[in-house]
Image (cartoon, rainbow, N blue to C red):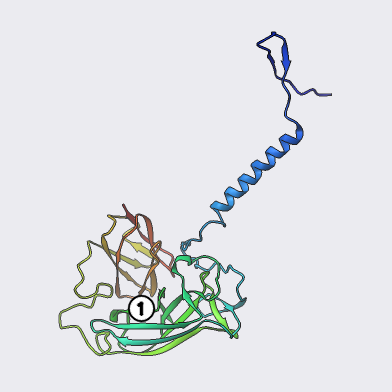
Amino acid sequence: MSVRPETRVRCDACGIPARVARPSRRTTRVAALVAVLLLLAGGALAGCGGRATTHHKPGTTHEEASGGVGTLLEAQDGTGHRLREVPAQGAPEVGLSARPDSEDGWNLQLAVKNFRFTPDSTGGGALPGAGHAHLELDGRKLARVYGPWFHLPAAQVPQGPHTLTVRLYADDHTAWAVAGKAIQAAAPLTAAPGGSAEHSHPAGTPSDAATPPGASPPDRTVTLAVRDGKAHPAPDRTELKRGERVALRVTSDRADTLHVHGYDKELALPAGQEATLVLTVDRTGLFEVETHTSGLLLTQLLVR
């Protein structure tokens, strides 16, 4: 029979060794259980219990399909997002109208009902009547919309008649649907020569898709390109100071979408045409700039 070792100390008063009581088995088991519970709690806070993130790995979608609202269908919206069906009564609704801007492009209004825009919780579980919208031009995604108003630059609309579509999505990027159909609205749009609606820029004045007339020029301009499935130049870091305005000028040989993580800014990249996104970096950190379809990392914005 094995004997557990005992630790003995000597009494200061009489000098006689005294036996020190060993911890009971029950005490040991309780301590071990508490340690396990603390470890599990820490993992939950750092993992699925923490705040959801909108970041995703290149080549994948944002969709998490989480939350118990409505019924998650196998059907998709045509862009790879599953439908989340809810009853018609009390379901989100959206309307779309477009009016020419006095300087450039169009101002779009999304009139929603039973719905609220929640940019702060994008990437989390689906919440009733909440989320964001996607804006499409002739079935091609232009941007993600986080509010009732959106400015569409003329440079993003080729000459001729088009159809604008907005579709409502939950925070987990599933599309809200009723009776098996995505909740969306459409509006016609016709661009005159030069990409404008009822006006054009003076001769010799370029149309900047991201810098409003009268605005100060950006502090930094970063020129990037995507050719044959590769980023040019090779991905690197662009160091910026907080508060600076940076212009990302990107040309892609295939239609794609530019995404700035952390700021959740998106820009449509027409095939073979330069597109520009001007961004004020108002928070510090490291933010990746990548393409959605090709899943390429173009650069990292290091803001100090």
Q: How many marks?
A: 1
Say if 152 sits above or below 55 in the image: below
Q: Residue furthest front?
A: 13
Using the rendered view, name the quadrant where residue 95 is placed: bottom left
Residue found 41% across the figure and 82% down from its top: 110
**Kind of residue at badge 1:** Phe
Rendered position, 263 above or below 203: above
Q: Tell me where residue 180 appears, x and y as whole percent.
A: 59, 84
Residue 207 versus residue 58: which sits nearer the camera? 207
272 to 285, vertically: above or below: below
The residue under label 1 is 150
Residue 161 visible to an observer of this rendering: no
Picture quadrant of residue 281: bottom left
Q: Residue at x 50, y 65 (%)?
A: 123
Image x and y of residue 224, in percent: 30, 64
x then y, percent, for residue 169: 50, 75
Q: Quadrant of residue 73?
A: bottom right
How far from the left and from the top, in percent, is residue 174? 54, 74
Name the foreground residue: 31 vs 183: 31
Relative horizontal placement of residue 17, taking residue 203 as reference (left or right): right
Crowding near the residue tagged with mark 1, few <14, some 14–19, many ≥20 C-alpha atoms within 10 Å: some
The vertical placement of 292 against 149, above or below, is: above
Quadrant containing the N terminus in the rendered view? top right
| Residue 288 in view, yes or no | yes
Judged from this view, the residue extending furthest toward the top is 15
Q: Nearer the viewer, residue 138 or 97?
A: 97
Secondary element at image label 1? strand
